[in-house]
Amino acid sequence: MFRQLGQSQINGGHVSKKQSGSRFSVMTALPYRGKTTQLLQRYRQQLDLQRSSGTLGRALWLAPTQRTRAMLLSHLLTEQFDVAIQPQILTFDLFAEWILKVSGHSSRALPELPRRFFLAELIATLNAE
């Protein structure tokens, strides 16, 4: 998720962006059109901005599965971007666990569907603020 990004849509098989002022990004395109590559580059830019301003841990990327998270982490570092301090690439489950941990509340495992509804509501609330 990136603050400065707006909604994206398919334009002739290529990804085009529309600025909407949203703090969240939705990027859609056909397979193998470079979505992940573009998002990784933007995530690296956000991490670099954070590193230079001293505000680490503020760029969050929610990955749908542990497999996707592992792939993103393995592709994050490049020759030009060789250090990532506190990259917040999390699955929905890890994000939920982190929220419970920092809130100081005891946790009880929720079934997956109610957990996803809870996270969707939480994200909508945070986006509205």
Image (cartoon, rainbow, N blue to C red):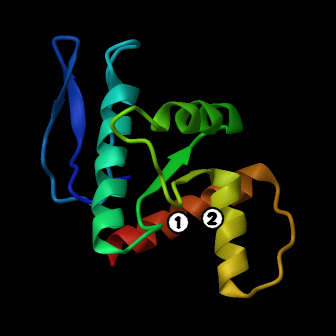
Residue at horizontal 37 percent and vertical 41 percent from the top: 81
**Residue under numbered circle 2:** 118
Residue 94: image quadrant is: bottom right
Q: Position of residue 9 (x, y in %)?
A: 22, 29
Q: Determine whether, in the image, residue 77 is placed left or right of residue 65.
A: left
Within-10-Å neighbours for mark 2: few <14, some 14–19, many 20+: some
Residue at horizontal 63 percent and vertical 60 percent from the top: 95
* Residue that protrudes farthest toward the bottom in the picture: 104
Which residue type carries mark 2? Answer: Phe
- The image quadrant where one finds the C terminus is bottom left
Residue at horizontal 47 percent and vertical 52 percent from the top: 84
> Quick one: 70 or 85, which is closer to the camera?
85
Q: Determine whether, in the image, residue 91 is placed left or right of residue 14.
A: right
Q: Are marks 1 and 2 in contact (CB under 8 Å)?
A: yes
Q: Determine whether, in the image, residue 101 is placed left or right of residue 8.
A: right
Is residue 24 positioned above or below 9 on the image?
Answer: below
Badge number at residue 50: none
**Residue under numbered circle 1:** 121
Circle 1 SS class = helix
Residue at horizontal 43 percent and vertical 73 percent from the top: 125
Q: Position of residue 124 (x, y in %)?
A: 43, 65
> Quick one: 49 or 70, which is closer to the camera?
49
Circle 2 SS class = helix
Is residue 43 positioned above or below 41 on the image?
Answer: below
> Quick one: 24 or 51, which is closer to the camera?
51
Inter-mark Cα distance, 1 to 2: 5 Å
